[in-house]
Amino acid sequence: MTFAEQYRTDLAKALAGIDTDKVQQAIEVLKEARENDRQIFVFGNGGSASTASHFACDMVKGASWNRAKRFRIMALTDQLPTITAYSNDVSYDVIFMEQLKNFARPDDVVMGISGSGNSPNVLRAMEYANSIGCKTIALTGRDGGQLGPLAKLNIHVANPHMGRIEDGHMIVCHMICYYFMDTEK
């Protein structure tokens, strides 16, 4: 078997382990947020930051375009000046939490993405979100780390390989986005 074939085989196994009932629960949480004009915040580091940005783009454009009710979603990862200011002047651990302090309100949705589940800045933001009564969703990998049990809803890609974890997270995001794009025409 070639490397590409093995990767595909291993990815298929990782995807088969995703709890689609939890993905459906996330869809319902986001649908309720849209219906009640709640804000949605998403964030992560590295590849997870890219996934957060991609997810926000899909929800702002694809899942909202030409619709009476639209998603109010923001990727905190896209706020580069704010991120660098807090990183330089305070601590990298607070880059998402401090943004939430400005914008998040009770019953808003906060979605943290972390392959390891142990990113300090994602954990601090999730702790803050829980403390003010936000609905929290995590996308985690490996054993879920500290983030998994911290979130009210954890969608877990139980795989040790970061590439397959990130692939799984992107597919979960597409499951969510395309629910709105394909079923609510």
Image (spheres, helix red, strand yellow):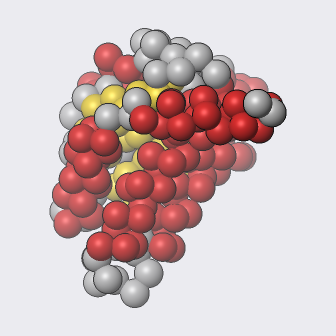
What count of labels does the image hold?
0
> On the picture, is 4 further left or further right than 129?
right
Picture residue at 47% right of the left edge, 50% below the top: 173
Q: Considering only vertical position in the picture, is 26 above or below 15?
A: below
Picture residue at 69% right of the left edge, 33% below the top: 7
Q: Considering only vertical position in the picture, is 170 above or below 12?
A: below
> On the picture, is 93 further left or further right than 185?
right
| Residue 6, quarter of the rendered image | top right
Q: Position of residue 83 (x, y in %)?
A: 67, 38
Q: Position of residue 46 (x, y in %)?
A: 70, 34
Picture residue at 34% right of the left edge, 29% below the top: 154
Q: Say which quadrant the N terminus sits in.
A: top right
Farthest-out residue, bottom: 66
Q: Is residue 125 visible?
A: no
Farthest-out residue, front: 1
Between 85 and 183, the one nearer to me in the picture: 183
Between 135 and 164, the one nearer to me in the picture: 164
Q: Is residue 183 visible?
A: yes
| Residue 144, quarter of the rendered image | top left
Q: Considering only vertical position in the picture, is 162 above or below 104?
A: above
Q: Position of residue 178 (x, y in %)?
A: 41, 65
Q: Say which quadrant the C terminus sits in.
A: bottom left
Farthest-out residue, right: 2
Q: Position of residue 36 (x, y in %)?
A: 19, 62
Between 4 and 133, the one nearer to me in the picture: 4
